[in-house]
Amino acid sequence: MDPNEEVSSVPAQSLSPSTQAWQEWLAENGPRLILFARQQTRSSEDAEDIVQDALVKLVEKLDANEFVGGQEAWIPYLFTAIRRLAIDLGRRDDRRKRREDFVSEEVESDQKDALHPWFESESSDDETRQLLEAGLKELPPKFAEVVIMKIWGERTFAEIGEALEISQNTAASRYRYGLEALKKKLSSARRKGDLSI
């Protein structure tokens, strides 16, 4: 999902200040929202759809003057919306899967995940990215989502607690347990010299 995709055909000088501000905000925060959504969903495409749906909900609330809080409340709102939309999507997919009784879909999903990495960065070493991604996928979801929100989402424990509807102490505890579990999972790679973190 390219935040500049929609307005890239419009000359920069004709963009309104609010459109430019929105583009800048999305360019800054879009990657962390996508990363969080990827942790919540089964494919990159679903993650991008979820983020887009959450952003549409935010814009609709802003347009209707129903959003409580300023711009600083957007990220916590979006994390919560992404999580809820991902849960709804997961339930729909599970029901459809049971109806269709189609087992090979799971294999296709695994192949898509291998082709669409969670971490997209020019500075990311592919091997390190793969090791981190595999380690995060092996963590229990409740730990992985807190680790991602804290490190890559740059959220406080209070914000994470609010977004996940848990106490900030529970968020901090899940973060510590998640990091410890990730450290154990990645320790063999560190000993072999495959990982330098």
Image (cartoon, helix red, strand yellow):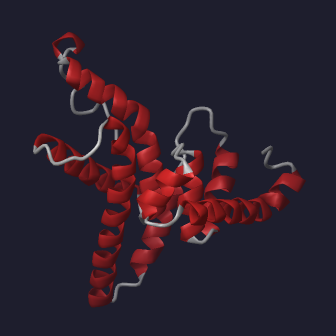
- Outermost residue to the top: 13
- In the picture, the quarter occupied by the C terminus is top right
Which residue lies most toward the left here?
64
Quarter residue 133 falls in:
bottom right
170 to the left or right of 196: left
Left or right? Give the position of 2 relative to 39.
left
Foreground pick, 157 / 27: 157
Is residue 27 placed above or below 89 in the rendered structure? above
| Relative side of 39 to 88, left or right | right
Q: Which residue is pictured at 24% across the width and 14% down the height?
A: 12
- Residue 47 image position (x, y, % from top left): 37, 56
Residue 75, image x, y percentages? 38, 45
**Residue at point 22%, 25% (across, down):** 19
- Image location (x, y in percent) of residue 100: 28, 87
Q: How many marks?
A: 0
- Residue closest to the far right: 191
Nearer to the camera, 196 or 26: 26
> Compared to 20, does 47 lie above or below?
below
